[in-house]
Image (cartoon, helix red, strand yellow):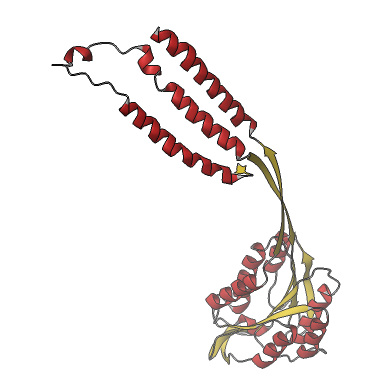
């Protein structure tokens, strides 16, 4: 409840001197009679008049309070809101080349990337998200969709050897751009995750970045791999053997790709840093929420006015009829 004219509520302060004056009058009108002892009066029963003596004044005070509240125009407010969401289109371009089997992230780079990306997808229910994978070539694992359960299952099915080995970063990025260039969504984002340097494909990463910029697509590039060396399993006629490789790749190209499109570059050296990177992207690309609030106010002074009139009527009845009859 709200008041349309709350200034009238200050009139209630006038009750302080009125009540003070009433108490002072009661004290001033007390009769004084000297008696040797008042013990005999204590046993006398209290009359109905004594109980009702202060009721008229209490009713008058209540009437003044209710009239003041009525003057302040109490209003009941019915509020409701209308919400609409404006999702973001996000295409994930995931490197599945052989070096993504390196075990500096646990259990390996690819599985760590899949697990963190899956959590990211689940936490963004209002966005259209898709998946492109690339190695020596590139293909779309899942087009933009809001059916995230399907997307998560397709993420789980991604594995090494699905396509010819190599690292075609430019081709993977161009494929992701092609999948979202016709989108009418205002915010379009590509998360490019790789651990290598572009060595395959007919499209240069920088060229793909320029195309993305043309369509208003931001690219967040994530370089995966610890500093130093990492163990990579290799299939041989003797079974799986581990080789050690330098964890180095073309970070400068990834930085340029991100800068060209207005995105950012990140380096993930372990599982924890990879998770934090996705959390940062999640904060940078918040889904837009538009809220329209409506309010309908209804005047509610009548109950207070009626209450004040009832109090005044009861005061008149008690003061001039009930108390007068008891006195007589």
Instruction: Please state, as top left, top right, bottom left or bottom right, where the N terminus lies in the image.
Output: top right
What's the residue at 82%, 73% (across, down)?
179
What's the residue at 41%, 33% (across, down)?
19
Q: Measured from the top left, where is residue 121 in percent x and y?
A: 67, 65
Left or right placement of residue 5 versus residue 134 in this view: left
Q: Measured from the top left, where is residue 167 in percent x and y?
A: 72, 87
What's the residue at 68%, 37% (across, down)?
299
199 shown above or below 128? below
In this rendered view, identify the residue nearer to me: 62 or 266: 62
Q: Residue furthest top?
A: 328
177 shown above or below 14? below
247 shown above or below 43? below
What's the residue at 65%, 35% (across, down)?
300
In this rendered view, identify the residue nearer to me: 166 or 52: 52
In this rendered view, identify the residue nearer to me: 14 or 244: 14
Q: Quadrant of residue 241?
A: bottom right
Q: Measured from the top left, where is residue 17 in percent x and y?
A: 42, 38
Q: Residue furthest right?
A: 182
Q: Quadrant of residue 137?
A: bottom right
Q: Measured from the top left, where is residue 69 in percent x and y?
A: 57, 37
Left or right placement of residue 103 versus residue 197 in this view: left
- The number of numbered badges drawn on the structure is 0
Q: Residue furthest left?
A: 36
Asked whether residue 127 is in view, the answer is: yes
Instruction: Please state, as top left, top right, bottom left or bottom right, where the C terminus lies in the image.
Output: top left
Left or right placement of residue 78 versus residue 209 in this view: left
Asked whether residue 168 is in view, the answer is: no
């Amino acid at each position: 409840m709200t008041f349309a004219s709350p200034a009238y509520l200050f009139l209630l302060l006038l009750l302080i001197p009125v009540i003070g004056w009433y108490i002072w009058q009661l004290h001033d009108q007390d009769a004084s009679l000297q008696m040797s002892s008042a013990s005999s009066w204590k046993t006398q029963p209290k009359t109905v008049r004594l109980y009702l003596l202060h009721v008229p004044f209490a009713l008058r005070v209540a009437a003044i309070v209710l009239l003041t509240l009525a003057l302040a125009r109490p209003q009941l407010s019915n509020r409701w809101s209308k919400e609409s969401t404006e999702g973001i289109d996000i295409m994930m371009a995931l490197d599945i080349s052989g070096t993504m089997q390196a075990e500096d992230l646990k259990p390996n780079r690819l599985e760590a990337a899949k697990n963190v990306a899956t959590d990211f997808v689940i936490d963004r229910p209002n966005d259209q998200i898709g998946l492109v994978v690339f190695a020596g070539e590139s293909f779309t694992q899942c087009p933009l969709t809001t059916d995230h359960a399907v997307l998560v299952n397709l993420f789980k099915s991604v594995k090494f050897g699905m396509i010819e080995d190599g690292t075609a970063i430019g081709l993977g990025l161009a494929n992701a751009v092609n999948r979202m260039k016709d989108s009418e969504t205002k915010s379009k984002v590509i998360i490019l995750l790789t651990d290598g340097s572009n060595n395959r494909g007919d499209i240069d990463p920088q060229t793909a970045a320029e195309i993305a910029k043309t369509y208003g697509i931001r690219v967040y590039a994530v370089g995966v791999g610890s500093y130093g060396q990492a163990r990579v399993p290799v299939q041989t006629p003797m079974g799986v053997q581990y080789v050690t490789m330098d964890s180095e790749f073309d970070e400068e190209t990834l930085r340029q790709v991100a800068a060209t499109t207005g995105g950012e570059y990140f380096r993930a050296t372990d599982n924890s840093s990879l998770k934090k990177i996705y959390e940062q992207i999640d904060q940078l690309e918040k889904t837009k929420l538009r809220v329209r609030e409506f309010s309908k106010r209804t005047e509610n002074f009548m109950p207070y006015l009626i209450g004040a009139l009832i109090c005044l009527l009861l005061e008149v009845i008690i003061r001039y009829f009930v108390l007068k009859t008891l006195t007589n």
